[in-house]
């Protein structure tokens, strides 16, 4: 069972339906203890970072997600769920992320339109097992007003929107995507299929 | 680069597509999901469903429509038409729609915008504006083209963005159904006045109309209904012409297999 972290935020039905379309059984999980039985975990999120972060922590998901990561359970963060992997966001400085990765999330600046809404090409910088079917230049659907700025070497893909912005971050057993794979047609389904069929591996403490 | 979006629009009544049901290759061209699948295959970047059901059943049919589309399609879609409460907006979004478009009810009570945006985010909140030229400005028209709202369209767009709208769907009543091309003056005025994306609608009859739209205004997307329904143009055909003119579009995707 793939667990979709349900902290009351985001278009969870679409994520579940897209996973079903690639043959994966996914369930919305509201009780943090429910993550212990998951073979993989999706962390979604849309809208305001502060609201997402508050609700995520209020539901008590942070310790279970950290534990799942220690156990090597594959984790995929989507949109604000990806931003939550970092330490915080200037959208709401009072709210902390999970802090799997060092860095913060900043407002898109120097661009004619905020939010960025629509399909944009992703420049693939480094590979990852779950990106094996993603080609350099594949288009994905973005909706965001903020973007992550990583303070460590975890950027796997960028998107050009008034300059390169972080589109994909990741490492062993963990991937965060700023775009919406569940709304990115065939390109998104390919990514979700690779994630859904990933084997859990044990991640040694202190490594990515 | 961010691609310019081509957005087919489907008018739906009582769960059925109202016009454009003459596709020979569809089993049931009146089924919005079948038609939506076709547009997805053609390369439609997202879809807009405009529900014009008037019956007491409309709340159930519009939520059901959103759920059925979300089962079948994995591209973004918006549901609009008669959305008068944040509760209904929430039901539609939870069923799987990505955005809801509000129109007349938001003109009557703009708090509807902040309520929906506050609960579900600006990214899910689209303002649909029907506008008609009146001397030196554009007048907002509500109730499906019947009533002048007494508001300036550019001013309303700006106000609505301040209230939390994340995107504007701008329909020119002067051009709607005329096949004279998008209203570039109206679109340009609104797109220059706001920082959120603007979808132009009304009047498109050729791929060149889309080229003009994207070369001469800051519009982010162009919406059309009948030209795609009746097969005069395909989304892919429009994109080929745009690409040849140097306008960024989403290329045809590799099929999922």
Image (spheres, coloured by chain):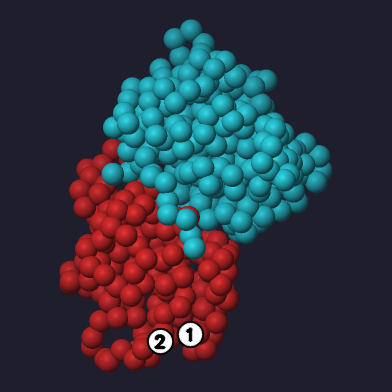
Give percent across and percent down for residue B74.
53, 56
Judging from the image, mark 2 belongs to the subunit labelled A
Give percent across and percent down for residue A140.
39, 54
What residue do we see at 44% from left, 32% from top? B238
Say if A165 sits above or below B112 in the image: below
B90 left or right of B119 in image: right
Determine whether label 2 and label 1 are within 8 Å by CB: yes
**CA–CA distance in space, label 2 to label 1:** 7 Å
In the rendered image, the quadrant that contains the N terminus of chain B is top left
What residue do we see at 57% from left, 69% from top? A20
Structural crowding at the residue carrying mark 1, measured as other residues with C-alpha within 10 Å and reported as few (<14), some (14–19) or many (≥20): many
Q: Which mark is residue A181?
A: none
* Residue bearing the label numbered 2: A200
Q: Which chain is painted in red?
A: A
Q: Which mark is residue A39?
A: 1
Determine if marks 2 and 1 fall on one subunit: yes
């Amino acid at each position: 069972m793939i667990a979709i972290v349900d902290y009351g935020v985001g278009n969870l039905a679409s994520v579940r339906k897209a996973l079903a379309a690639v043959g994966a059984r996914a369930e919305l999980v509201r009780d943090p203890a429910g993550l212990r039985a998951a073979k993989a975990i999706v962390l979604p999120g849309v809208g305001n970072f502060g609201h997402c972060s508050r609700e995520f922590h209020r539901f008590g998901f942070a310790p279970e997600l950290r534990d799942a990561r220690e156990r090597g359970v594959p984790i995929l963060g989507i949109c604000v769920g990806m931003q939550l992997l970092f330490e915080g966001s200037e959208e709401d400085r009072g709210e902390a992320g999970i802090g799997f990765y060092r860095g913060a999330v900043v407002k898109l600046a120097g661009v004619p339109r905020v939010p960025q809404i629509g399909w944009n090409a992703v420049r693939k910088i480094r590979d990852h097992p779950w990106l094996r079917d993603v080609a350099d230049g594949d288009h994905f659907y973005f909706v965001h007003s903020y973007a992550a700025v990583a303070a460590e070497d975890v950027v796997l893909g960028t998107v050009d929107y008034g300059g390169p912005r972080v589109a994909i971050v990741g490492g062993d057993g963990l991937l965060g995507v700023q775009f919406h794979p569940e709304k990115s047609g065939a390109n998104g389904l390919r990514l979700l299929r690779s994630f859904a069929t990933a084997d859990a591996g044990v991640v040694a403490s202190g490594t990515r | 680069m961010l691609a310019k979006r081509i957005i087919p629009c489907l008018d739906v009544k009582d769960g059925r597509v109202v016009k454009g049901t003459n596709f020979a290759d569809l089993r049931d061209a009146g089924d919005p999901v079948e038609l939506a699948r076709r547009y997805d295959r053609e390369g439609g970047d997202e879809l807009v469903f405009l529900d014009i059901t008037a019956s007491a059943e409309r709340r159930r049919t519009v939520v059901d429509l959103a759920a059925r589309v979300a089962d079948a399609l994995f591209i973004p879609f918006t549901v609009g038409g008669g959305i008068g409460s944040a509760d209904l907006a929430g039901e539609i979004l939870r069923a799987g729609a990505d955005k809801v478009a509000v129109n007349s009810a938001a003109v009557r009570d703009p708090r509807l915008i902040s309520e929906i945006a506050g609960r579900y985010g600006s990214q899910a909140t689209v303002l649909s504006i029907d506008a008609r030229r009146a001397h030196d400005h554009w007048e907002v028209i509500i109730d499906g083209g019947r009533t002048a709202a007494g508001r300036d369209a550019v001013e309303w767009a700006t106000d609505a963005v301040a209230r939390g709208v994340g995107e504007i769907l701008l329909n020119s009543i002067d051009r709607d159904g005329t096949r004279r091309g998008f209203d570039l003056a109206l679109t340009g005025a609104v797109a220059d006045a706001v920082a959120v994306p603007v979808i132009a609608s009304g009047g498109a009859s050729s791929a060149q109309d889309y080229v003009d739209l994207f070369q001469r205004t800051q519009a982010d997307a162009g919406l059309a209904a009948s030209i795609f329904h009746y097969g005069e143009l395909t989304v892919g055909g429009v994109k080929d012409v745009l690409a040849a003119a140097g306008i960024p579009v989403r290329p045809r995707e590799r099929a999922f297999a």
